[in-house]
Image: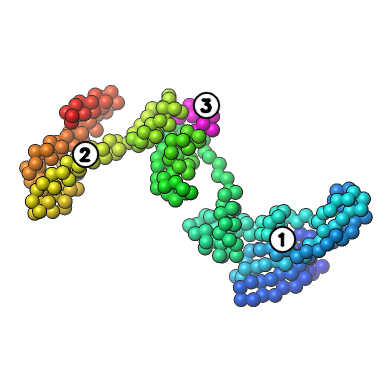
Amino acid sequence: MQNNNIMNLFGFKDVVFDSFNEDNEFVHVHAHVSKMSICPHCGSKRIWVHDHRVQMIRDTHICGKKSLIHLKKTRYDCKSCGCRFERKLDFIAKGHTMTKRLVCSIISEFDEVYSISSIANRYNVSSNTVLRILNCLSVSRDNLSEVLCIDEFKGDSGNNKYQTSLLNGDTHNIIDVLPSRSKVSLFEYFKKIPSKEMMNVRFFVSDMSNIFKSVKERFFKLSVHIIDRYHFIRQVLWALENVRKRIQKDVSSKFRRYFKRSRSLITKPSSRLTSDEANEVCLMLELSRDLKLAYGLKELFYQYVLIQPTKKRAEKCLNEWIRRAE
């Protein structure tokens, strides 16, 4: 009875404790499965022992040490129905060498940022075992929101350099994370989503990627495509930077260093420049007509295009600005 109580403390039903010993790293628990008297298939009592075997089962830590259970299991033959069987144990899955609670402990480690190898070493399992457990976990996707934000980010998932995130634009909660940003993988993903759910998306927010544009045109035809003004501004600033770099190569070494140190000033809106910074910008613009023209277009974009209150007026002003830039 005492031995049964010991194994009950472990949460092991139908297991009898025999002994234990420990070394510097492990606690070794020796136990055996309790005997069976009835065939689980036909209910006959005419059963015989077929063989015995000892299975090594890894369990959670005991007193700070890794634990290893040496469990003696018995297989039986039923003379009535001919079935061969052994007692089913609820603390370990069939064919596994880890207890279910050890698997749960490994899963709990995923709440923090640990490497796969560190988790494997901590629980006396291989890195592949940890990866298999991780791959078995399924995370449900939230429904697409009225404001759907899609963006790429650099990650290390599989063989893909960039992944894709889907975000609820109202709550800022993550809807899903996709392993790739390729057009093929995105199309395959959205094909699996019911069309009724996609029709609920009123606003599709992305950067200026052609891939995201293709996704919007294919799956969200009725949605309004919104591109954050940051992406437009970035294109304008990149064009200005290209002019600055070209001019910088043709000036003397003295001014070349000055251009390089002051490159952040010409991209800054003039309304936010201090008087000293404004003087430095004026000096740079006096050295090049092309740079002065590019800077004027940048300021016109800030002061004329970005301030428009409606889509119609903004589109008209943007087209006028593009004609001037050409």
Number of residues whose C-alpha sits closer than 10 Å to that of mark 3, classed few (under 14), some (14–19) or many (20 or more): few
Give the vertical position of 98 relative to 140 (above or below).
below
Mark 1 element type: loop
Q: Work out how far the residue at label 2 is from the one at label 3, CA to CA, in angstroms.
A: 42 Å
For label 2, the SS is helix
The dot on residue 11 is 1
Specify the quadrant of the image occupied by residue 140: top right
The amino acid beneath tag 1 is: Gly
Mark earlier in primary sequence (2, 3): 3
User: Which region of the structure is painted magenta?
Assistant: 190-203
Q: Which mark is residue 196?
A: 3
Residue at screen point 61% across, 70% down: 65
Describe residue 139's horizontal placement relative to residue 97 as left or right.
left
Residue 214 sits above or below residue 71 on the image: above
* Viewer-proximal residue among 67 and 238: 238
Q: Circle 1: is it few (<14), some (14-19), or many (20+) Cα within 10 Å?
A: few
Q: Is residue 180 visible?
A: yes
